[in-house]
Image (cartoon, coloured by chain):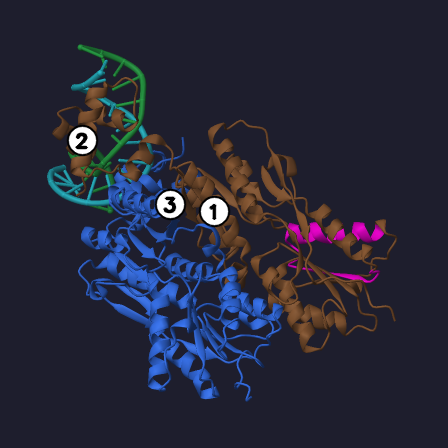
Chain colours: A blue, B brown, C cyan, D green
DNA sequence: TTGTACGCGTTATCAA
DNA sequence: TTGATAACGCGTACAA
């Protein structure tokens, strides 16, 4: 068995409760006893038992990360590691640990979250996705459990603390960027339509078209997975139309890569034949050819701000619900050009 | 306060210990009591307190993942999410949770691991990297704490259960692949030289050259970070030599991307002017242009096998040390061709 | 088959 | 300033 507080107490000739106070650095313990106790801890190699502390404290010093069913390909997207890095940094600074869900299906995740929450395994949660109709958020609200959403809530927006980009505005700017280059036939390629981020970017796209007096053409709106394979299919689909678009707004860099790949196969050149702007500004977007013009959304900051907000919620339980908007910025590279004049 | 085992006991008119036995599904509890107790649990919405269980059980039902100081760019490499996915799948299947380190510096990580281990926060560890001179492994061996290394131990190989590819052999095959195409001037571009995976692949490269009767030229061996920027620099360096290589063995797909990018800038074409084979077969290697010929190392399996092995260690503490080799395979794409004949 | 009583390691309250 | 003692919620010999 490991060395406990009692062993330390014995060696230091004090009561276990005194040792506990030394650990907490209580102000009403003499410097002298503190020293002797600390020496005893050192000598025995004492480490506090996490579960005993959590049990007595009613606090786990741990936050939970809820992944969108890390099933298959989604996790290939560097978006997640980057948010997690942001979360990790803040958590570490606050001496909190990180616990991750492992489930794949909605039911598994729901069960996990329930046992994490009720089992007091975590003090708060960060949800890494926002999906339309997600019951989890409603559940957490009902439980009054501290959590922060990364993304925009699909509903109950002012009851849920969340951290997001202004995706509508970002999509407006991206679309305007193409329009300003002279494009009048712009298509939108988005990910799974049940993700709020997709609908937001789609709405921005539509607004920009309307503002510019351009028609919204349904055949120019394509939904695919947030992945390359989706991108490939979308690319081929669009280019096989009688009146193909000259500009593409793509909801994710990875999809954009897939699209570029499929365009290359059918000998369509970027940006000579078609322009392409996408979102997230992942590292790869700088190193593919041509380098992608992409909207930087500061993923790391998304994670760290969310964690910041979560700690507020954990500390003061009756805080007003908050909304944090992380800035975005178009990074111009080489995937966009004026349309060809016939 | 949450609903406890006592509340359930009261409602079901039994002793708390009986409830505990029902949770453990003890065989010596009548089906009838089980039913009534379960009904009571259902009705009250009972969830077991994780810390109390762990404290009584001396087991956390959690494994820890030690990241190589998730600092900065390393985590951009899709390698990590993929291993974690493998780990996650196995952990979930065994009803174990996952806890992650958050530290960046070696000291932070060491401290974290120590408190995780001694604080009984995790039942076992998986190290996601193998670095020459890493004190952590020695420490864990001394503590006789269950852990599995992903990669090859730099020392004490038969005291450490580990899961790895045969990176030497893989590098031999990759190099031979270029040699068989007719290349005689092959360079090696590796990552941080303190990572064992780098040295293994470098050794394989050297062995293949020797076997083929080709000289080992020091100026053809370059070490950079496992990242694109490293790749860029390496690419420019090599091509500026008086006698530049015609074939490149690159230790990581991401670096290969960086190299391709820099080659494009100085108008060197792949594979016409130079051939390129790399490792890991990440998704992007299929979607860049030209698509990369890469060595598939089955990252997901690396993670799941490691977790499997860890559970063995956790269950039977006196198990022989094991070594698991995950197969690899060259995936041919379009980045290699015979050298130009002058 | 079920209840009693104690231990798991720590914190917190109340005395002293 | 420190000590004794009761929680925290659950598991488990031992008894019944």
Report the residue at 30% width, 34% height from top.
Answer: B53
The residue at which mark 2 appears reads as: B39
Report the residue at 86% width, 52% height from top.
Answer: B212
Mark 2 Cα shell of 10 Å, populated few (<14), some (14-19), many (≥20): some
Task: Look at the image and give the residue range highlighted in magenta.
Answer: B183-210
Which is in the foreground here, disc 2 or disc 1?
2
The residue at which mark 1 appears reads as: B65
Q: CA distance from mark 3 to mark 2?
A: 49 Å
Do the residues at pointers 2 and 1 share their chain?
Answer: yes
Q: CA distance from mark 3 to mark 1?
A: 30 Å
Report the residue at 76% width, 72% height from top.
Answer: B239
**Image mark 2: chain:** B
Quarter of the image for residue B258 reads bottom right
The residue at which mark 3 appears reads as: A38
Q: Is residue B156 above or below residue A271?
A: above
Helix, strand or loop at mark 2:
helix
């Amino acid at each position: 068995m490991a060395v406990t507080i009692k062993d330390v107490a014995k060696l230091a000739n004090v009561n276990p409760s005194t040792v506990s106070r030394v650990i907490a650095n209580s102000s009403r313990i003499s410097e002298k006893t503190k020293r002797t106790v600390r020496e005893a801890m050192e000598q025995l190699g004492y480490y506090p038992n996490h579960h005993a502390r959590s049990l007595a404290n009613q606090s786990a010093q741990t936050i939970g990360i809820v992944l969108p069913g890390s099933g298959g390909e989604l996790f290939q997207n560097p978006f997640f590691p980057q948010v997690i890095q942001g979360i990790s940094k803040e958590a570490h600074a606050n001496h909190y640990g990180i616990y991750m869900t492992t489930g794949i299906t909605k039911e598994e995740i729901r069960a996990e979250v329930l046992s994490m929450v009720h089992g007091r395994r975590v003090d708060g949660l960060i949800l890494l996705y926002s999906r339309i109709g997600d019951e989890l958020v409603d559940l957490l609200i009902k439980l009054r459990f501290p959590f922060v959403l990364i993304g925009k809530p699909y509903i109950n927006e002012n009851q849920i603390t969340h951290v997001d980009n202004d995706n509508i505005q970002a999509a407006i700017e991206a679309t305007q960027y193409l329009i300003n280059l002279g494009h009048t036939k712009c298509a939108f390629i988005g990910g799974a339509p049940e993700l709020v981020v997709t609908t937001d970017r789609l709405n921005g796209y539509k607004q920009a078209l309307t503002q510019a007096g351009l028609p919204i053409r349904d055949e120019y709106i394509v939904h695919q997975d947030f992945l390359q394979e989706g991108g490939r299919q979308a690319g081929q689909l669009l280019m096989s139309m009688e009146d193909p678009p000259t500009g593409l707004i793509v909801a994710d860099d990875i999809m954009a890569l897939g699209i570029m790949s499929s365009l290359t196969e059918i000998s369509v050149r970027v940006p000579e034949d078609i322009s392409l702007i996408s979102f997230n500004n992942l590292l790869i977007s700088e190193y593919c050819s041509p380098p992608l013009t992409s909207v930087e959304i500061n993923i790391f900051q998304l994670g760290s701000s969310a964690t910041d907000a979560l700690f507020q919620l954990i500390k003061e339980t009756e805080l007003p619900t908050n909304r944090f908007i992380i800035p975005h910025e178009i990074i111009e590279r080489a995937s966009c050009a004026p349309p060809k004049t016939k």
